């Protein structure tokens, strides 16, 4: 790729402490601010919410790297709560926290963990699809605690971030894409993180099976195929 083919990516890279770099953009800058603000949080917990594949788990991992947190899924949360949270644990991260609501044993386990962390001066990082106010929480005490937690939404990515993700995911597959291909894809693809992964995977598979590079004609064909296999509202434009 020569100088004229390179796509200009004007975004800072955030070192993700053992994970791939996290790219800060307007859609996630607010969330990163909360991660960097720790441990100066106003309460024991914080909730990051947004759609699937929007970067919630990645940001949670960045926070875990900073805080040395123990990562639990809802089932592990029940088990560790029943056994007793080890004295050494003062920071905990739980993904898919919205799945806790409406399940009595999970709600009581989360409430127990929040109380223990509060007593220890610890912290809890929750990720979810929606803010706690939208969760069908049955336990009033848990609902009251969650209502005190600050929340931050992850927004849809802009063109710069989509370009970064496309270039990076192609590079992860040892594919070097010309700037004209990225420019062609951006206005025609779905505006989501999940769409980037799906698009790159489909283009990579087609390029490998046909023994060719990822070009605009190939990109046009794959976009058309993808638009025909999902509702038009999903955002892929038929070319």
Image (cartoon, rainbow, N blue to C red):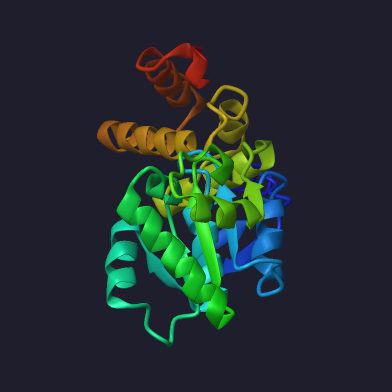
Q: Position of residue 223 (x, y in %)?
A: 45, 21
133 sits left or right of 10 in the view: left
For the point 39% across and 17% down, the residue is: 230
Q: Nearer the viewer, residue 133 or 182?
A: 133
Query: Measured from the top left, where is residue 136 in percent x and y?
Result: 46, 39
Q: Residue at x 43, y 33 (%)?
A: 199
149, above or below 129, in the image:
below
Residue 186 versus residue 12 in the image, above or below: above
Residue 162, image x, y percentages: 60, 40
Among the 4 quarters of the image, the one containing residue 84: bottom left
Q: Residue furthest bottom?
A: 88
Side of 18 relative to 187 (left or right): left
Where residue 43 sits: x, y (%)?
Answer: 66, 66
* 46 with respect to 77 (left or right): right
Q: Is residue 138 visible?
A: yes
**In the figure, 125 relative to 188: above or below?**
below
Q: Can residue 18 be spotted in the picture?
A: no
Total tally of numbered discs in the picture: 0
Which quadrant of the view contains residue 198? top left
At a point 52% along the width and 41% down the height, the residue shown is 177
The foreground one among 61 and 222 is 61
């Amino acid at each position: 790729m020569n100088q004229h083919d390179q796509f200009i990516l004007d975004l800072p890279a955030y070192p993700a402490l053992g994970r791939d770099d996290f790219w800060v953009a307007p859609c996630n800058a607010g969330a990163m601010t909360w991660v960097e603000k720790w441990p100066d949080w106003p309460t024991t917990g914080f909730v990051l919410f947004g759609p699937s594949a929007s970067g919630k788990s990645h940001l949670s991992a960045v926070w875990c790297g900073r805080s040395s947190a123990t990562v639990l899924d809802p089932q592990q949360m029940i088990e560790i709560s029943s056994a007793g949270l080890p004295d050494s644990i003062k920071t905990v991260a739980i993904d898919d926290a919205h799945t806790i609501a409406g399940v009595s044993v999970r709600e009581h386990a989360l409430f127990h963990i929040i109380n223990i962390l509060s007593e220890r001066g610890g912290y809890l990082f929750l990720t979810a699809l929606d803010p706690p106010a939208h969760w069908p929480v049955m336990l009033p005490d848990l609902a009251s605690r969650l209502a005190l937690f600050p929340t931050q939404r992850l927004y849809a990515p802009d063109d710069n971030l989509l370009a970064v993700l496309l270039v990076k995911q192609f590079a992860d597959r040892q594919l070097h894409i010309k700037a004209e291909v990225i420019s062609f894809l951006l206005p025609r693809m779905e505006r989501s993180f999940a769409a980037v992964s799906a698009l790159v995977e489909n283009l990579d598979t087609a390029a490998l099976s046909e023994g060719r590079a990822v070009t605009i004609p190939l990109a046009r064909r794959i976009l058309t195929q993808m638009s025909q296999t999902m509702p038009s509202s999903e955002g892929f434009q038929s070319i």
